[in-house]
Amino acid sequence: MKKIAAIIFIIMLAVQAQAQYVAQDPTRYIPNGRVLGLGKAYVGLADDTGSIYTNPAGLATLKGWQLSSMSGKFLDEYSFLSFSGVYPTDYGVLGFGFAGTSISGAFATTVEAGSDPLDPIYTIDPTQPQMGNYNNAFVLTYANKMSKVEYLKKIPQAENLTFGVSAKIYKTALYGDGIVGGDGSGFDMDLGVKYFPPQKWMTFGAAIQNLLPFGFGGKLTYASGHEESYPSVIEIGSAFKILGKENAFKEMGENELKLMVDLDYHPTSGNYPMIMHTGVEWKPLSYAAIRAGIDQDAAGDGNGGLTTVSDMAYGVGLNFSGFSFDYAYHTFAGAPNVDNNFFSLSYSYAPALEIKEKVVIDEPKDKLITFDDTVKMSGNVMDPEIRDLKAGKRTLRFGLKGDFQSVIELNEGKNRTDIKAMDRNGKLLQAMSLRALRLIKFPDVAVGYWVDKPISLLAMGRVITGYPDGTFRPEGNITRAEMCSLLMKTVDQLSTGEGTRASEEAGGNFQDVKTTHWAASFIAKAAKLGVVKGYPDGSFKPSGNITRAEGLAMVARFAGISEEAYNNEFNDVRASNWAATIIAGATKAGILKFLEGKPFEANNKLNRAETVEMLYRTTTVNTLLGKDLLNWENY
């Protein structure tokens, strides 16, 4: 990077020694109507073919080819014409441009006989052929992202930088009135960079126009041997997207407002002042733009020097289906009574975006969990090539805009509906699936009950069961034996080779649990795993209703939830309570969310709904559900 900066510095020192005669560069004055309507404040924006004449780095991010042209008369005398085009390739963006001015039909003059030599009178000489002049520039441009060029991608921020270089060939001629050797040709180059900071609502640019020193060939040479230099200009610019739908400082619907500011410095013209360009572009609608700008320039100050003058610029733009019409009105301080109107016509071809989602399903969403036996399906066909759309074996009809609606019937448990879209020849264009889990219902658990889905999921996952009469009784209490049973059944489902039969210590050596007790094996296993503990007298009390504190302790041990220092998580539980550290750990693990803002009430009887809620929030039970019911890959 330091070497590049040094080279540029040496070049800029060299250009100071250019010839005193200055050649006109038409590319600086007639880019296109949009650039002129912005007061030529475009170096930081540079986002269309106008970049060829202002900052060639702006071409690097264009996605499709573009063409632009402008013609008319300048100051009612000079005819002008500019034409430019851009074509992106896999190796960078190529651009070409032509900018030219001409005047013809100018009469030759002669000094009237007898007039004062100190104050001669000129009259038209009809005996001499009329005079004319043209000044043309042909431009070839290459632009790319720095990160895509091997020798530039190591530059800091290369991924946020683009560059562009333009080669300019000049052809000019002055003819008529016996002029000999009036043909001339020249060559020069432009270099530009553009920076895209993380703040996507702003961009910055810099360009050096006519950077070649006079001694390096950056000049215009006439057939007569006369030589003129092209003045170098260093430009820096910034663009800010104040309002916009996206990538804007403030997002505001379809409104789009951009502000641009440029500064120009002429290093080869010692008396040339620093000048500024400012522009504003407002798009109240996506197809219409209103523009205004201040285009500063240099003019004589009446004392042999130069001063800054400000010209006003205004413009409008309309675009439809890739075509753009841009109009600019530009004042000139040196010609206040002359209208200066500029018209541009452009076309931008944007490559069709690949339609990734040829069919979009609005509802239902994939991986649906519901109690309903039918669900409404609606969506849109996005690809016009689609002629046949099927949901399973059913053909779906869609409207002219691609919209469709249908109903999917769901069986209890897992459901999968395959959506297939085909073209007119039956070729499959897109395949997708809608997966849904229809939950079972208990007659005494209403849809909308605070743990309706967890109850159904745990029942379908065989973690809990209902009663023989088909009810669940969510508000019913749960015994200590029942808690051991459901916890150990869950352990068995997660383990391999584990049974549900009694261990060698049938009943867990609890004096009140006989080997013939229906839950003896579960109690023994729970005791062996440390999930339950008996009372000090050696009993277990299997038929006793479990308290909230006891139930939480069993669930926490089952799920491997560590105890934590108690920090008054619940106002009604003291730090000295035997379950305080268990409560703290469970709170941290998130299994007591149903009690947030409520008292814990440790001695209250735990009911079946609360048991389901705590179990459902453990990673252990979620792992079990993820093996089957919530393993969507197996649908």
Image (cartoon, helix red, strand yellow):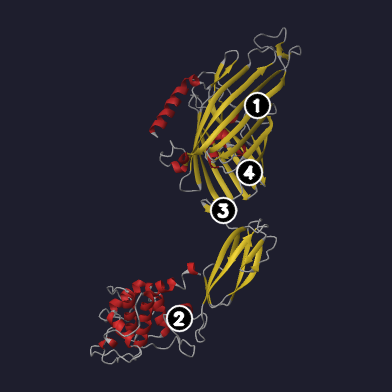
Picture residue at 28% right of the left edge, 73% below the top: 564
Q: CA distance from mark 3 to mark 2?
A: 48 Å
Callout 3: helix, strand or loop? Answer: loop
Which residue has dot 2 on it? 459
Which residue lies under the disc numbered 1? 101
- Check residue 349 in the rendering and tell me which mark sits there, or answer none: 4
The tag earlier along the polypeptide, 1 or 4, is 1
Are the residues at dot 3 and dot 4 in contact (C-beta closer than 8 Å)? no
Question: Label 4 vs label 2: CA separation?
Answer: 59 Å
Residue nearest the viewer, comparing 235 with 615: 615
Residue pictured at 50% horizontal, 20% vertical: 214
Graded by Cα atoms within 10 Å as few (under 14), some (14 to 19) or many (20 or more), the crowding at tag 2 reads some
**Quick one: SS at disc 4?**
loop
Q: Earlier in the sequence, mark 3 or mark 4?
A: 3
For residue 340, say whether it is visible: no
Q: Quick one: label 3, few (<14), some, or many (20+) residues within 10 Å? A: few
Disc 1 residue type? Thr
Horizontal relation, residue 141 to residue 571: left or right: right
Q: Percent from the top left, x then y, of residue 427?
A: 63, 57
Q: CA distance from mark 3 to mark 4?
A: 22 Å
What element does badge 2 sit on? helix
Residue 632 image point, x, y percent: 48, 68
User: Which residue is labeled 3 in the image?
Assistant: 245
Q: Counting residues from the N terminus, which is met first, the one under dot 4 or under dot 2?
A: 4
User: Nearer the viewer's eye, disc 3 or disc 4?
Assistant: 4
Q: Amino acid at mark 4?
A: Tyr
